[in-house]
Image (cartoon, rainbow, N blue to C red):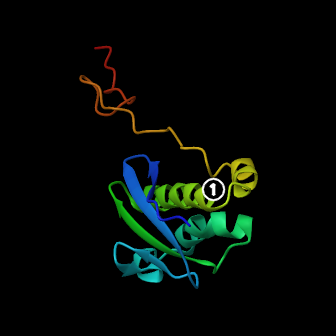
């Protein structure tokens, strides 16, 4: 069984995921799943690995997540759950990999440069 903690990351969010046999209860930062993610899109994102592997309602999920915004946290949890499912059953790897759930999204916020208001934006050019 997955008595191991699996880590998922996205942008600056870090999620530590623990799966246990159960009824499908999801607890995030000791809060109820619906209370933590109020938007349906984020809830669906978190549950995608279960839907793809037909394991929805078979495992209880315990998550500690911090950093970043709500979307980054949802996608970090999705990666952690996908990795945990592969840890439970190696047969899930092929399905999850085909959906792209085992790939860590490397996109990060570009740093602000000096002499500019943002990373790419320039101050208005004045010819005179």
Task: Please state if 50 lies on the left or on the right of 121 as rendered.
Answer: right
Q: Residue furthest left?
A: 114
Q: Kindly identify the residue that appears in the image at 63 percent across and 79 percent down.
A: 58
Q: Quadrant of the C terminus?
A: top left
Q: Residue furthest bottom?
A: 23
Q: Kindly identify the residue that appears in the image at 60 percent across and 44 percent down.
A: 103
Binning the other alpha carbons within 10 Å of mark 1 as few (below 14), some (14 to 19) or many (20 upward) gives some
| Residue 45 horizontal/vertical position (percent) | 58, 64
Q: Kindly identify the residue that appears in the image at 47 percent across and 65 percent down.
A: 3
Q: Is residue 103 above or below residue 37?
A: above
Task: Please state if 85 lies on the left or on the right of 115 as rendered.
Answer: right
Q: Kindly identify the residue that appears in the image at 33 percent across and 32 percent down.
A: 111
Query: Which of 77/19 is in front?
Result: 19
Q: Quadrant of the N terminus?
A: bottom right
Query: Which of 19/99 is in front?
Result: 19
Q: Is residue 87 above or below residue 47?
A: above
| Residue 43 horizontal/vertical position (percent) | 55, 72
| Residue 105 horizontal/vertical position (percent) | 54, 43
| Residue linked to disc 1 | 86
């Amino acid at each position: 069984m997955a008595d191991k903690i699996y880590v998922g990351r996205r942008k600056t969010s870090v999620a530590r995921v623990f799966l246990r046999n159960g009824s499908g209860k999801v607890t995030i930062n000791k809060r109820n799943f619906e209370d933590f993610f109020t938007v349906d899109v984020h809830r669906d994102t978190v549950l995608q690995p279960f839907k793809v592997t037909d394991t929805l309602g078979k495992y209880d999920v315990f998550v500690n997540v911090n950093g970043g915004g709500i979307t980054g946290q949802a996608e970090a949890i999705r990666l952690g759950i996908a990795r945990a499912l592969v840890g439970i059953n190696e047969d899930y790897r092929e399905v999850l990999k085909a959906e792209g759930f085992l790939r860590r999204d490397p996109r990060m916020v570009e740093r602000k440069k000096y002499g500019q208001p943002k990373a790419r934006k320039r101050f208005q050019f004045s010819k005179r």
